[in-house]
Amino acid sequence: MPLTRFLAPYAAVVMAAACAQPAPRHGVALEPALPRPAFTLTDTRGAPYEFARETHGLLTFLFFGYTNCPDVCPVHVANVAAVLHTLPFEDQQKARFVFVTTDPQRDTLPALRRWLDHFDKAFVGLRGDDAAVTQIMQAIGLPPAVRSVPGPDGRYEVGHPATVIVFTADDSAHVLYPFGTRQEDWAEDIPRLLRVRPRSGG
Amino acid sequence: MQWWCSASGKPWTWEPQYYPGVWLVVAALAVGFHALSRRGRAMGESRLVYWSGWSAVGLVWQALDWPVGPLAAGYLASAHAVQFVTLALLAPPLLLLAVRKPLAAGLPTSGRSGRMASLVTQPVIAGVLFNLVAVVTHVPLVVDTLMPTQAGAFVIDIAWLAGGLVLWWPIVVGAPSRAWFSAPVRMLYLFLSTLFHTGIAMVMLLREFPMYGIYELAPPWDAWTPLEDQHLAGGVMELAGAAVIFSIVTVMFFRWSGGVSGDVAPPPPPRD
């Protein structure tokens, strides 16, 4: 049919545009995309949490930090929580925030739960020994956490990456968000990240 | 040591901090006020007005120094709003009231300085200047750029005080006198001057997300979230600002209406 032949190239362009994944507008693009890592740590109920299986196909915010962090961690977590709370319920159900402590000595499971509950009771807290967490961080290309020398009062700080890595429904992270990402930025990007479709056959 | 309060990004502590720049500015204000207010007292200004002027010096000091100053500079938009209301709306009329007579007497009337004084104290220009300062110093880009530096935070604080003095001059000092600037026009002037900062407050109240990066990304303040803090800031600007302006407009209105009714001839005494 001549008409079909005439429209075919335009239809292909429209189809390609429709199939293109929506690109986030903020954060730092990861090229190539980072596959969703497979690791198991202990969640705040004391049960093993298989990250890849539990978060498969979900928009997942992965963050390494510690509950005594005075600035970056609470701000980053609070900003994501504030924006997630503005989403429709069904979109909230498609998102998981997973916080892995880099300070297992002080971050006991109850302490981790209490701290996360300030932001959202659904946020997942994970704990493992230093070696396990360091291995996970290195596997996804993050520098390991570094503990400062304790002061006279025994208090210390933990240097850690200040980035939230976001895995989308295609089980890949295409972007990471450094500290300084504003709520407005999250509000613009999260709906776009939620529209990323799972890989075909995935 | 910091000479002026600015956003530091460090977690808040209740350990007092010292800001020599704030002390110098307040000391300069106090010395200037002392000199002028003594002349004001000699010219018949009341003791109440004199002491209210000194209380305004104290208000300026409290607004700029620890803890309000550093809280406003880098932690809480609501403290920033308290600072705005204090520096721009509350302290200036009290300061000017105590020294209005010497200020009016000493206002240059000729030459370049006379022309400049006449221009700046022109109500329309004063109102525009104040609102320009109020709007520009609340633009998120300006706030986020200036507040992390001591010089930038200084500029915003001093702009508010200077803007407040310019706003209130035509009302409180009223020199040079302008026939058209009658009591009803003065009330209208004050009312119109509140519109812009009311607009800023409404934006703060209605925004879904925090406007200012320095407060949103500041080390957290446990009592409330950055958005709640911003709403509080909007409320402070809206309510405290309106309370100051409208209480003064109310006083002006009753004085004016009393003056009008005083013009009416009293009824004749009853005859026996």
Image (spheres, rainbow, N blue to C red):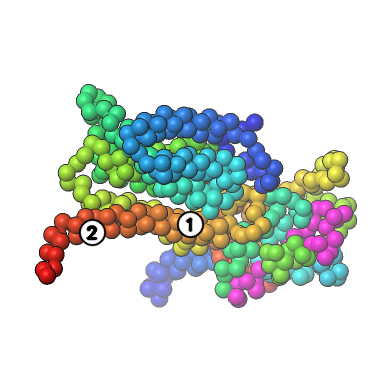
Residue at image position (45%, 41%) is: B51
Q: Position of residue B118 (x, y in %)?
A: 24, 34
Compare residues A6 and B90 and report the one nearer the observer.
Answer: B90
Specify the segment rendered in magenta.
A89-112
Q: How many marks?
A: 2
Looking at the image, residue A158 lies above or below residue B155: below
Tell me, yes or no, whether dots 2 and 1 are on the same chain. Answer: yes
Label disc, if present, on residue B236 of the rendered structure: 1
Q: Position of residue A41 (x, y in %)?
A: 84, 63
Cβ atoms under marks 2 and 1 closer than 8 Å = no
Compare residues A52 and B61 and report the one nearer the observer.
Answer: B61
Compare residues B219 and A200 and report the one nearer the observer.
Answer: B219
Q: Find residue A23 and report its image quarter.
A: bottom right
Q: Position of residue B242 (x, y in %)?
A: 39, 57
Does residue A40 show up?
A: no
Q: Position of residue B52 (x, y in %)?
A: 44, 44
Query: 10 Å neighbourhood of mark 2: few (<14), some, or many (≥20)?
Result: some
Going from N to C along the chain, the mark reached first, 2 or 1, is 1
* Residue position marked by numbered label 2 in the rendering: B257
* Image quarter of the C terminus of chain A: bottom right
Tag 1: residue type?
Val
| Parent chain of label 2 | B
Tag 2: residue type?
Ser
Does the magenta-highlighted stretch encompass residue A102?
yes
